[in-house]
Image (cartoon, helix red, strand yellow):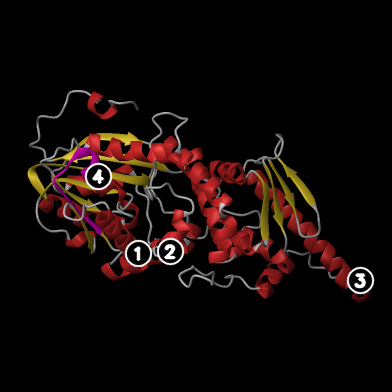
Amino acid sequence: MKNHHAPTLDAPEIGEANIEMAAVAVQTSNPPAASTRSEARDSKVLAVERSLLEQLLRKLADPPLRLVLWDDTEILSGDSPPIATLIVRTRAAFFRLLWDPNRNFGDDYASGEIEVEGDLVGFLAALYATTVDVPYSAAGLRLFPGERRPRRNTLKGSREHIHHHYDIGNAFYQLWLDEEMQYTCAYFADAGMTLEAAQQAKLDHVCRKLRLTPADNVVEAGCGWGGLALHMVRHFGVAKVRAFNISEEQVKYARERAKQEGLADRVEYVLDDYRNISDRYDAFVSVGMLEHVGVENYRDLGEVIHRSLTPTGRGLIHSIGRNRPGYMHPWIERRIFPGAHPPALSEMTQIFETRRLSVLDVENLRPHYAITLHHWLERFEASRDQVRGMYDERFVRMWRLYLAGSEAAFRSGELQLFQVLFARPTVSDWPLTRAWIYRDGG
């Protein structure tokens, strides 16, 4: 039985007729004789298509690729051996790719009209490294037509966006996440760690940074499947954790785990938006939620933190980020993570500056996320038959591309992973060095 929560793909935005018109429009003005018109027209279109593709590859700094078109035409790009082979199976997919590759490549890959044979992650990393400053296609068509802002994360919008991604079924995520169901960057204090060990190390890393004690009451904004809250109680003995989340599937799962472990009296999972956090806490923590908040809401988040922390309170935000302000890849925002926005550090500071919160430490775990995603992708591929049975082949290809593209983005430096530690400005007893963070390795 198919899972009814599975996302669906819309129809392509550019129809066959418009694509054909785009090709015909670049032909010469002298038509051939009627008896040979069709044959000459087909030849002209193919010549134009090859020319457009070669010019586009030059603008992309000739990445080392092999391209195969729908009529078996082959084009080699770059001087090095090809990383992968890009197969464009239809003329329609070719023109959609020229018109808007950021959105249309993903949809056509998911449907099978585009295929990548070889190193998919390496292929995508090479494209990330070369497309930053390429604004137009070889035909003069807009290559990246107008970055679209992510959908706004209002109270209603946030629930819909989280439901789209996280409520597609816990069984799906259990196939490829670790045993603790950590869907955020792990911490590889040792490169040879298993994913399970690295996720435990991440939880420890966060807790050590917050200098948690048994006297602390903690609030967590966006708790996933509840693993961090349980870890804080189990291994650091905190008095109480209230964890807020708007994913019904995740909260249900987390509550059951707390009950099974006999910790329901110390860990409370609240099915509510972070904007409704109340009471006072010694520590505020958010791991993997800021990407779903939206820059327009950062000042409000700062206000929530300000009213929630005690006079000696401290906090940590762990978030995917960027080197400079920009938007989530449009295909991922459209198909996988609606409303998502990975912020630059300059954007994150809006959370702290308006409420006089002092930033104590900033750490970039970008290499750790590339390794984490590599593990996830391997496990996903090992489970693809089960995923196909739960959803369909298009869903499998869509999520393969998402995970591979994410690994490529961290590997190439397109994305970062920031951990920002902060406190009230009156907190003056902070250690002089980072030694307390890295004890026990790291």
C-alpha distance separating marks 3 and 2: 57 Å
Look at discs 4 and 1 and give the one toward the viewer.
Answer: 1
Find disc 4 in the rendering and name its residue.
349
Between the residue at mark 3 and the residue at mark 4, the CA separation in whole angstroms equals 66 Å
Q: In this figure, which residue is indicated by the disc labeled 1?
A: 249
Residue type of the residue flagged with mark 1: Glu
Is label 1 in a helix, a strand or a loop?
A: helix
| Highlighted range, magenta | 231-244
Amino acid under label 4? Thr
Q: Which residue is found at the position 38% from the left and 57% from the top?
A: 340
Q: Mark number for residue 36?
A: 3
Label count reads: 4
Q: CA distance from mark 1 to mark 3?
A: 63 Å
- Circles 1 and 3, Cβ within 8 Å, touching? The answer is no
Left or right of 177, for residue 89? right
Image position, residue 109 (x, y; %):
62, 59
Rendered view: 154 above or below 442: below
Q: Quadrant of residue 236?
A: top left
- According to the image, label 2 marks what residue? 169
How crowded is the residue under tag 2: few (<14 C-alpha within 10 Å), some, or many (20+)? some
Mark 1, other Cα within 10 Å: few <14 / some 14–19 / many ≥20? some
